């Protein structure tokens, strides 16, 4: 499959190849059309996974002191848990990744379909294209707080129904559950 | 944008519920009869394989409404792994699915290695394959034992756990632990394979086919077993694909697909084994697939042993001092080794920026691991594609028009491990 073919995907923005995997980014509004096209025209009959990712604070940890920070080498903080070089900036905070698989005997083609989203920006549901997306999208909402538009049953799935916040977001603290009673009071 | 109703219907003859694919809804007509009984099943019930809760609505003995409720075992593994260095996060992976621990460990280590671009010695590759297949046997034995127990074949449990015990002893011999072995490191294995392992494992491989025949002798001709499993919990090939089913559930619905053969990882392209496919998509065929898969796994283990015995004395881990711990004895004589050891243990190694999705065939199906690295010492995001999670999406389709007594057999046949479902 050459890169040219991916241009035909509705709403196509960009195609990247890395680590032997292809990622294509599509526009948010064209997601359902892109999915339908990939399923019917390209044969991606199987949705493996839907993974949301939060890029809040991406590349903010600073460059490692051992190599040198932008401000210079910090001798008091050598080899802090930073980067050797700053990672590439991301266009928006959230990414919804759809891992597709063309499942036929003797061959496996995989593709990652991605949509970039701002905070609280909703993504159209693909349950109508692959029914298995039902729980995956509920998980993305529950864990990352990505609203899924048109989902037939968008309820929390892993956390309690009355849970506040979305635990896998980068601004959700570790040990962040509310303490109802404590000895301090 | 909403889902177009005509698109929501996948194809003719589908058993997937229409509005929500994972919920069986009672029709208003039936509800108006006032004859519907709502039963809450679980989360604490001996036959739910952990803490699965099913809210079912009955019309007489027939299941007409069903909703699976999960999340009771949510532990936040993915969030925790983001807080640990790559090196330490490997410890979390096996605990996600506590029945097929080594496969979970394997998929995460493979993802790290793909990002690192590190070359793994062949001895480590073959040993990983051997342990992954032993682990598949372990998982299928636990499934067969507990599912048999639920259907009244109590003695099945004792026989299966007899072989399971031998497998756990083998794990202990190699890794020092019976479960959650954490034997795979990025770059290879944590320790060399002990000498006594090969003869012990060979003894097990030779005894296993007879044991499988013994299990089949217990239930295969058993009228009760056949009546309770044949034609129960139907799932067509198209429904299985649409619902993302994988592994034995998919192959029991007649789809000839196995990651080990069609997208080979480790050295699966160099071993001889058959992919087991059965056509009917019922509980009986899922049982048949797992039984035959145990035989195939035994075959693979024997081939791994043949290869491994020729590799005596070879390296079991890559010699890359930026990622792999230096040999213990060097720490007393080499300053550089001591520094490398200290840095890897305290701070961890850095994994190049990027993202990968690695899929392997776990005993329950396609186990995927999506990993994002920002180039720092900790994973930015780890997401597991848990086959059990997806398998539970099929409960509403499989249980359609079935009797309440069959529910136990059907849910059991999907082989879900709640630790993996809830993560």
Image: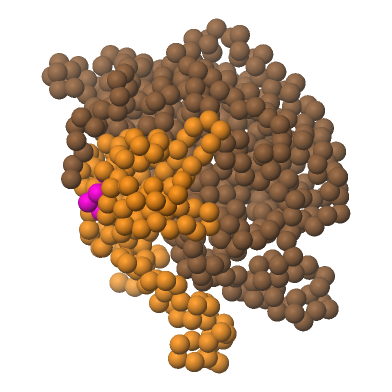
Magenta stretch, residue numbers: A28-32
Task: Verify whether residue A18 appears in magenta.
Answer: no
Above-or-below relation of B258 to B118: above
User: Where does the image place residue B275, in percent across and percent down from the top left?
Assistant: 61, 28
User: Where does the image place residue B150, in percent across and percent down from the top left?
Assistant: 51, 23
Q: Output the letter for the chain in orange.
A: A
Name which residue lies at 83% across and 55% down: B314
Judging depth in this view, the residue of A162 and B334 nearest the camera is B334
**Residue A92 occupies quadrant:** bottom left
**One can see residue B100 in this view:** no
**Residue B132 occupies quadrant:** top right
User: Where does the image place residue A184, in percent across and percent down from the top left?
Assistant: 34, 73
By secondary structure, the bulk of the magenta-drawn segment is best described as helix
Above-or-below relation of B71 to B321: above
Name which residue lies at 44% across and 13% down: B231
Q: Which quadrant holds the N terminus of chain B?
A: top left
Q: Output the letter for the chain in brown.
A: B
User: Where does the image place residue B186, in percent across and percent down from the top left?
Assistant: 64, 59
Judging depth in this view, the residue of B380 and B205 nearest the camera is B380
**One can see residue B170 in this view:** yes
């Amino acid at each position: 499959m050459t890169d040219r073919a991916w241009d035909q995907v509705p709403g196509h923005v960009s195609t990247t190849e890395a680590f032997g995997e292809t990622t294509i980014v599509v526009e948010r509004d064209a997601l359902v059309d892109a999915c339908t096209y990939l399923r019917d025209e390209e044969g991606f009959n199987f949705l493996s996974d839907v993974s949301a990712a939060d890029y809040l604070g991406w590349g903010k940890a600073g460059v490692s002191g051992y190599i040198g920070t932008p401000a210079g080498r910090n001798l008091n903080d050598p080899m802090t848990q930073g980067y050797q070089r700053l990672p590439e900036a991301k266009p928006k905070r959230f990414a919804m990744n759809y891992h597709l698989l063309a499942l036929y005997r003797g061959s496996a083609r995989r593709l990652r379909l991605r949509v970039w989203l701002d905070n609280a920006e909703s993504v159209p549901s693909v349950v109508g294209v692959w029914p298995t997306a039902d729980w995956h999208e509920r998980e993305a909402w529950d864990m990352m707080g990505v609203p899924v538009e048109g989902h037939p049953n968008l309820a929390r799935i892993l956390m309690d129904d009355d849970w506040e916040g979305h635990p896998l977001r980068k601004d959700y603290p570790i040990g962040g559950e509310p303490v109802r009673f404590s000895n301090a009071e | 944008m909403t889902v177009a109703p005509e698109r929501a219907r996948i194809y003719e003859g589908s058993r997937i519920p229409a509005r929500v694919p994972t919920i069986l809804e009672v029709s208003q007509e039936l509800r108006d009869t006032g004859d519907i009984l709502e039963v809450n099943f679980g989360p604490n019930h001996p036959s739910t394989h952990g803490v699965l809760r099913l809210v079912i609505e009955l019309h007489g003995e027939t299941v007409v409404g069903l909703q699976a409720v999960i999340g009771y075992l949510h532990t936040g593994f993915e969030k925790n792994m983001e807080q640990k260095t790559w090196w330490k996060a490997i410890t979390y992976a096996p605990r996600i699915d506590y029945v097929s621990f080594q496969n979970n460990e394997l998929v995460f280590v493979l993802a790290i290695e793909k990002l690192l671009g590190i070359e793994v010695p062949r001895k480590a590759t073959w040993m990983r394959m051997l342990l992954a297949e032993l682990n598949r046997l372990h998982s299928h034995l636990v499934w067969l034992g507990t599912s048999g127990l639920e259907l009244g074949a109590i003695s099945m449990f004792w026989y299966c756990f007899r072989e399971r015990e031998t497998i756990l002893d083998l794990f202990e011999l190699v890794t020092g632990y019976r479960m959650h072995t954490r034997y795979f490191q990025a770059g290879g294995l944590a320790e060399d394979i002990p000498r006594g392992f090969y003869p012990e494992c060979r003894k097990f491989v030779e005894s296993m086919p007879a044991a499988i025949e013994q299990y089949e002798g217990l239930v295969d001709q058993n009228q009760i077993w056949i009546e309770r499993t044949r034609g129960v919990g139907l799932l067509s090939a198209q429904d299985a694909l649409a619902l993302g089913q994988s592994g034995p559930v998919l192959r029991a619905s007649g789809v000839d697909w196995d990651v080990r053969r069609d997208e080979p990882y480790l050295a699966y392209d160099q071993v001889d084994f058959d992919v087991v496919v059965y056509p009917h998509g019922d509980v009986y065929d899922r049982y048949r697939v797992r039984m035959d898969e145990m035989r195939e796994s035994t075959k693979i283990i024997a081939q791994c042993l043949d290869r491994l015995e020729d590799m005596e004395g070879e390296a079991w881990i890559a010699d890359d001092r930026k990622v792999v711990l230096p040999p213990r004895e060097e720490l007393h004589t080499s300053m550089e080794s001591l520094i490398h050891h200290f840095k890897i243990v305290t701070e961890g190694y850095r994994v190049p920026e990027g993202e990968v999705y690695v899929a392997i065939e776990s005993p329950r199906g396609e186990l995927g691991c999506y990993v994002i690295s920002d180039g720092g010492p900790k994973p930015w995001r780890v997401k597991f594609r848990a086959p059990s999670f997806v398998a539970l999406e099929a409960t509403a389709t499989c249980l359609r028009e079935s009797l309440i007594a069959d529910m136990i057999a059907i849910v059991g046949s999907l082989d879900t491990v709640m630790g993996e479902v809830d993560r």
